[in-house]
Each structure stands twice: as C-alpha cells, then as structure tokens.
Image (cartoon, coloured by chain):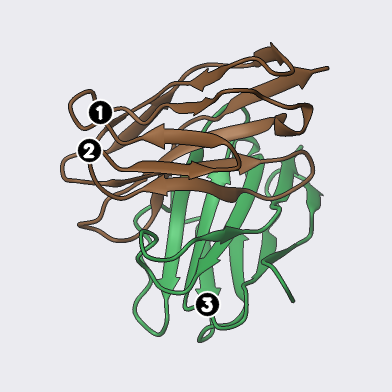
Chain colours: A green, B brown
Amino acid sequence: GAGVSQSPSNKVTEKGKDVELRCDPISGHTALYWYRQRLGQGLEFLIYFQGNSAPDKSGLPSDRFSAERTGESVSTLTIQRTQQEDSAVYLCASSMDSFVVRTEAFFGQGTRLTVV
Amino acid sequence: GNSVTQMEGPVTLSEEAFLTINCTYTATGYPSLFWYVQYPGEGLQLLLKATKADDKGSNKGFEATYRKETTSFHLEKGSVQVSDSAVYFCALSDNQAGTALIFGKGTTLSVSS
C-alpha cells in the first residue's frame, strides 16, 4: 500500500487477555518502529527493527511485551496478560533506514487499545 | 537522558493570528530536531526538521530554528489558518544512537474563523 497500515484500528480487550497488533510498513522500508502513546503523554519508544539485525528492545516496558518482524515485512506487537495501564494508542512507523535524520519516518494511524 | 519538553495546550487562536509553540530539549550530544503534525483522523507526519545548530526548518509557512544556546526549537507561523488545527509534536533524534525519535507530549492547536 501507499502508507503504513495498522490493524485493528481499535481493540477492546478484557484484563488478562493477550492481544496482537499488526503493522504493514511501506514496501522497501528497512526500519520499523513501535511507539506507545498514553492519554496526555508523548510518544514512548518501544522497539525498532532494522533489516535482519537484532532488534532494539530497550523501550519495551515489561516481559509481557514482545514483537516480531520477518525480514522487511509485517511486524506484530504482542501484549500478554494485558493490564489496564496498557491502554494506549500504539503507533508503528517505518523509514528507509535506521537513521531518521537521513530519511523521514512515516507513521500509521495507530491501534487504540482499551483494556477493561 | 534525552528529553523534549513542549508547551502545554490547547492553544486556541483566531485565523491569521501569529503562532508560537515552544519546545526545549535536553540531549547529551548533538541531536537532530523535528516537528511532526497529526491532523484529525490522520497519522503523524513530518512537518519540518533541522539537523544542526542554527539551521532553520520550514514547511507550509511554519518555521523553527535550532538554537543550541537555548536548547530550543520553537515552532512559529505568521498567520494561521483553520486547516492548521492539529496536534503538533516536537521530537529529537540522538544522532549518536541513530535510532528512535524522542517525542514531546504534543500541543493541540485549534484555529477558529
């Protein structure tokens, strides 16, 4: 597609359930990022993938969070045993490489996750 | 660590008013600085950027100058339009890490005719 696509756009889940969020980056983009935006907060970096290199997981808030990406294609962010504090908008972005100063990062419209 | 602080919103202006949204940063190195904008119902998109001190980024009538001495990157526009109503995010990239953008909390701008 023309842009970064995320699904679902909205997700309501019960506390304790697992959820999986999907991101389709722009074709040819080697770098992919996940961010979280809680209400009234800035964007919090979670994880980034660059080609076949080991991902930078330094932003993941707990071991309940994990993400996968196969090559330069789709990425999934999984949250296990969801908690109410996980409620947020999860944003995915992709760029041509890992140096955002050189290339622009393009964002999807996000998945709004609500844990009840 | 690195951080970005931007002015609290919402900012409410009449059409053709002058806009300033303040942004200051803390960084250990020499970061690149960005403004992203999120229009209603759309994803974040890059508005402008500056990669070194004294650089001025500009786009769509918006400008921001990278001021190292005051660690600031304030966003300005001389005459806002209703279509500028959006959420504006200031961000920095640590060039030493060369990876993720660090964002401020965002400032909501509402322009009325």
Instruction: Please tell me whether residue B70 is drawn above or below residue A3 in the rendered image.
Output: above
Q: Residue at x 74, y 20 (%)?
A: B111
Q: Name which residue lies at 42% across and 82% down.
A: A51
Spatial CA distance of label 3 from label 2 is 27 Å
Give the structural element (helix, strand or loop) at label 2: loop
Residue A2 image point, x, y percent: 72, 73
Residue B105 place in picture, x, y as percent: 51, 30
Q: Which residue is mark 1?
A: B71
Q: Is B10 placed left or right of A30 in the picture?
A: right
Q: For the point 27% across and 50% down, which residue is it?
A: B94
- Can see residue A79? no
Q: Quadrant of the N terminus of chain B?
A: top left
Residue A106 visible in rendering: yes
Whether residues under marks 3 and 1 lie with C-beta atoms below 8 angstroms apart, the answer is: no
**Type of amino acid under label 3:** His
According to the picture, the residue beneath numbered tag 3 turns out to be A29
Q: Are marks 1 and 2 in contact (CB under 8 Å)?
A: yes
Between marks 1 and 2, how big is the CA–CA gap? 9 Å
**Residue that mark 2 sits on:** B27
Q: Amino acid at mark 2?
A: Ala
N-terminal-most mark, 1 or 2? 2
